[in-house]
Image (spheres, grey):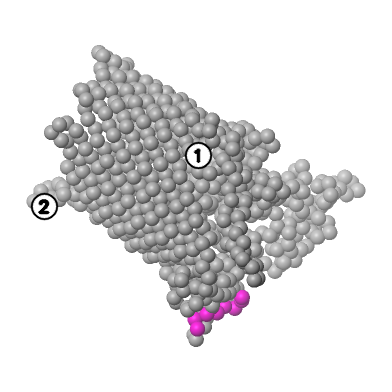
Amino acid sequence: SINGGFSRMDNDSYIPNAETSRTTMSFGGNGQLDNGLFLSGTINYTNTNQSAPQSGASAFNDYFGGAAGGSIFARLFYLPRNFDLNGLPFENPVNGNNVFYRALDNPRWIAKYNIYSSEVNRAYGSMTASYDVTDWLTVLARGGMNTYHEARRNVVRKGGIEIPNGLVYTEDLAYLEQNYDFTATANKEFGNLSVNALLGMNMQQRELTRRRVTGNNIISTGLNLTDGTSTQIVDLDFASLRRLYAVYTNVVLGYNDYLYLTLTGRNDWSSTLPDGNNSYFYPSASLAGVVSDMVDLPLFVNFLKVRAAIATVGNDAPPYRTGNVYSIGVPFTPSGGAPINRASLGNRLGNPNLKPEFTSEYEAGFEAQFLNSRIGVDLTYFNRTSTDLILNADLARSTGYSQEVVNVGELNNAGWEIGLDITPVKLNNGFTWNSYFAFTKIKTEVIDAGPTGELLLGGPASTLGTIFRNGAPYGQIFGSSNARDDEGNLLIDPQSGLPFALPTSDIVGDPNPDFTLGWTNTFTFKGITLRALVDWKQGGDFYSFTAASLLLRGQLKISEDREAIRVVPGVLGDTQNNVALLDENGNKIQNTIGISAFDSHFSNGWGAYGQDEVNIYDGTVIRLREISLGYSLPKSLLEKTPFGSASISISGRNLWFNAPNVLEGLNLDPEVLGELPDSNVQGFEYGSAPTTKRYGVNLSLTF
């Protein structure tokens, strides 16, 4: 048999000059030769092109320097309401240079000229050969590859403010992953006992190369080529190689087709760990029984299965975490002298004693169906403990490094996953209403954060970030907070009328949600299917730069009355001892000191430029994740056509959300929170681009 596929996607963003296209082709097949050898294989190719103006997060353009800002969102938060951005010119009609009311790049000018583009060509596939040596023994060899090349180009037009002479940089990335498995599988039955045993070997290799060339000072506007610049610098030339070898086994013992014991074991050898620590073994065991096949149950119980498992999983490190790395810099050429080559030591301290991290977990649960499968329950409790986690931790700059690679002690995650499937209505005319609930609740706790009991994992600033602390949930938001008395009242400086900070930063928020709940309703009737998915995430704090920026600049409706004199609610306090001041009768003194609008919004202590805790919000959000309406044509209408099936559907995603504890009028979607994919930092919103609603039409045909 053979199969093939083709798809094409084009997407135009609400961001000006931002677009994406993707073309995918695939081909595969399988067959058995006369000698009994079975062969199968697939190959897939994808071409992705995307381009967009600079439109990243804007927080660092206001709070942490870089006031010029290269993002189209960097200044939108700060525009006066009476500035006609779309009506006033944004470029010089003579030379096309930037025009703006301040010494900044106009967002419209950025959107037109400063374009980042990327083209990715990716191919991936695998080939498998298997042979039945006997009726109970099969050997298999499988090899697969995943490779891509990405060509990036970033253009900053000449004539702007941030980079007046402009620049062009090109970056090429090449990635190749190879994966090979060799297995032998035996299947035997001995009366009521069945045995399925697998023994295998795996070889895996990952290669990545990156090379970036930056050209500064564009010679001729519009000639956006690297060699069309005055100077070119190779500012990145990087290669990494990672190998992993493994042997593994899997044994499944079955009894009477209703009781199964599964045992596994795997040993890995990794090239990214030092000698002596690069070999690690991890096993697992699970037991599952179909109780409804073992014993007679009440008639309303159609199916009951119980299960329990215990497992350990090992993990190695990313490449080059065991040593200290030097980078080659641009040679320095003194006046009248010969070039002097330069190399600089990286900011990350490697760990020559790095160990693999391990995660051990036990879980138990059951699946059950009742009342002719009108009600189904899938419940799981799990308890997961991770030890020797491999993390980058902040380090005192006095050491000469800013981060160090560490094995952090112990982290525990425990929780419940519950699936409830209900069919309240199922009529003889074919109308069916099915409702499915997926509930997850996880509690995390840091058991051991190392010798000091805590580690700062990074974040926006040295005093604002994510902390890993003994006894606290994972990934707490660490920042400055206002002083309070023993009753929780804000302490007010009697000299200024403003709250004042505690001397040291501390935990000011927990980004972990209390629970998540997904609710899917599906209605079907005579080929028509209506489906809706509602999500609910309860809790989970986050720090919002968007809220801070818009609030303190009066850009929200709730800020209309921003010029009034304000009195901060609280009691007068001692700024040296952080305790409440008392009157002659021993009572706390309520604050009555008025402050100006400027002090309220900008001064250190109360407004968004004050302590970090005032910018923390609860991330509870309820959203209509998706709704779709589809129709499948009856088989009778397709009998004389080449089609096996035909269906059409319309859908919408992210159509509505409500975040009740975010500032009124802000319309911020808590889903825009994000850090780098490999970061352990969480709970920060950096002035990100808004999320979008998506609508689609799908036509599906089979032949």
Q: Is residue 528 above or below residue 415?
A: below
Magenta stretch: includes residue 359: no
- For the point 45% across and 45% down, the residue is 241
Q: Position of residue 696 (x, y in %)?
A: 32, 58
Q: Which residues are magenta?
A: 95-103
- For the point 53% across and 65% down, the residue is 233
Assess disc 2: are there few (<14), some (14-19) or many (≥20) residues with their C-alpha within 10 Å of its C-alpha.
few
Q: Which mark is residue 272?
A: 1
Q: Is residue 249 above or below residue 224?
A: above
Direction left: furthest residue: 640
Q: Looking at the rendering, in which quadrant would you find the N terminus? A: top left
In front: mark 2 or mark 1? 1
Viewer-proximal residue among 577 and 220: 220
Viewer-proximal residue among 175 and 441: 175
Viewer-proximal residue among 6 and 432: 6
Viewer-proximal residue among 269 and 631: 269
Name the amino acid type tagged 2. Thr
Q: Position of residue 621 (x, y in %)?
A: 50, 50
Tell me the distance, in whole angstroms, between the alpha carbons under discs 2 and 1: 57 Å
Q: Is residue 640 above or below residue 81?
A: above
Q: Tag 1 or tag 2, which sits nearer the N-term?
A: 1
Tell me if 555 is positioned left or right of 1 in this view. right
Assess disc 1: are there few (<14), some (14-19) or many (≥20) residues with their C-alpha within 10 Å of its C-alpha.
many
Do the CB atoms of the residues marked 2 and 1 lie less than 8 Å apart? no
- For the point 38% across and 61% down, the residue is 119
Direction right: furthest residue: 584
Q: Is residue 301 visible?
A: no
Name the amino acid type tagged 1. Thr
Q: Which mark is residue 641?
A: 2
- For the point 37% across and 34% down, the residue is 202
